[in-house]
Image (cartoon, helix red, strand yellow):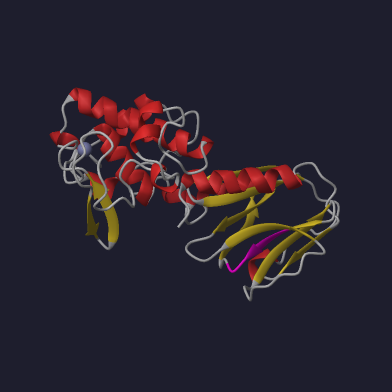
Amino acid sequence: MPEGPETRRMADKIGSALINKKIDSINYFHPNLKGLNRTKIIIIEVTSRGKAVVIRFDNGMSIITHNQLYGRWTTNYLKTKIKHNRKLRIEFCVDNKAIRLWSATDIKYLKTMDENNHHYIKNLGPDVLDETTTYDVIFKRLIDKKFKNRNLAGLLLNQNFIAGLGNYLRSEILFYSKIMYDKKPKDLNLDEKNSLSKNIKDISIRSYKQKGKTLFENDLMLKYLDSSVKRRRFMVFARKNLRCFICNSKIKKEYISSRRIYYCTVCQR
Ligand SMILES: [Zn+2]
């Protein structure tokens, strides 16, 4: 499933195709979009909240879509033949292109001012990519009594703690913070809590900017350690039995509540 950074990049792409453009046609194939005005409507903003895409119109209305595992946005030229059998949900045609949403079922059309009451959005914590979500905001949530007794493996996937984190970010954040997944915020010393707060923010932003890659692109040391570009996306995620870039021991993999997690037993404590 796409995590916050992937969803935000998807929203950026939809936005750059649609914002303030004259939309030639809007088609929808989902009962929740019945009230959608199909003429003379302008899209003024496209953003993400956690893993949902939010499209805002100039008439005070918004569409919120949550892709879960199967939904997918695409951009194609109108003349491009579509070769898959996914169900079409929304189609915006503009400048000879079609921006389409396929397969998603969680689609809502509602007043922009009511976005925070949306069934998914109302349960979200601060969005990790939002500039108001500072290190300090994250630190305060770590020590909040609601979260401090929970183990980090679960907490880092809990969208009510910080929205937008997911599976690969969880493994990477814990590795960079040198903390094992079974620790709880209350077990951490001040330095560890600071490091974790900073990494939650920085690694998510880095992944957003670097298209899903959490490594520093300019890390010259890593360039010499491993020649495969694919393997150099992450420090630990999807690297089972490969050597840790830092200490050379083997990366471990486990399933926790059926989600895979990767870690280094030497670098993380
Ligand atoms: Zn290591």
Question: Looking at this view, is 30 or 99 the one in front?
Answer: 99
Question: Looking at this view, is 184 or 241 the one in front?
Answer: 241
Q: Classify residue 71 by image quadrant.
A: bottom right
Q: Position of residue 120 (x, y in %)?
A: 47, 55
**Residue drawn at the location 34% of the way across and 52% of the way down:** 238
14 within the magenta span: no
Could you tell me how many numbered marks the image carries? 0
Q: Position of residue 160 (x, y in %)?
A: 37, 46
**Residue drawn at the location 58% of the way across and 51% of the way down:** 53
Mainly helix, strand or loop, the magenta region? strand
- Where the C terminus falls, by quadrant? top left
Left or right: residue 5 versus residue 75 is left
Q: Is residue 114 above or below residue 202?
A: below
- Where the N terminus falls, by quadrant? bottom left
- Residue bounds of the magenta highlight: 99-103
Q: Is residue 244 above or below residue 154?
A: above
Res 249 seen here: yes
Instruction: Write down which quadrant ligand 1 falls in.
Output: top left
100 within the magenta span: yes
Q: Position of residue 33 (x, y in %)?
A: 68, 64
**Residue drawn at the location 24% of the way across and 52% of the way down:** 241
Q: Position of residue 199 (x, y in %)?
A: 34, 31
Left or right: residue 184 versus residue 110 is left
Left or right: residue 107 versus residue 37 is left
Res 30 seen here: no
Residue extending farthest bottom: 85
Q: Is residue 120 above or below residue 233?
A: below
Q: Classify residue 139 by image quadrant.
A: top left
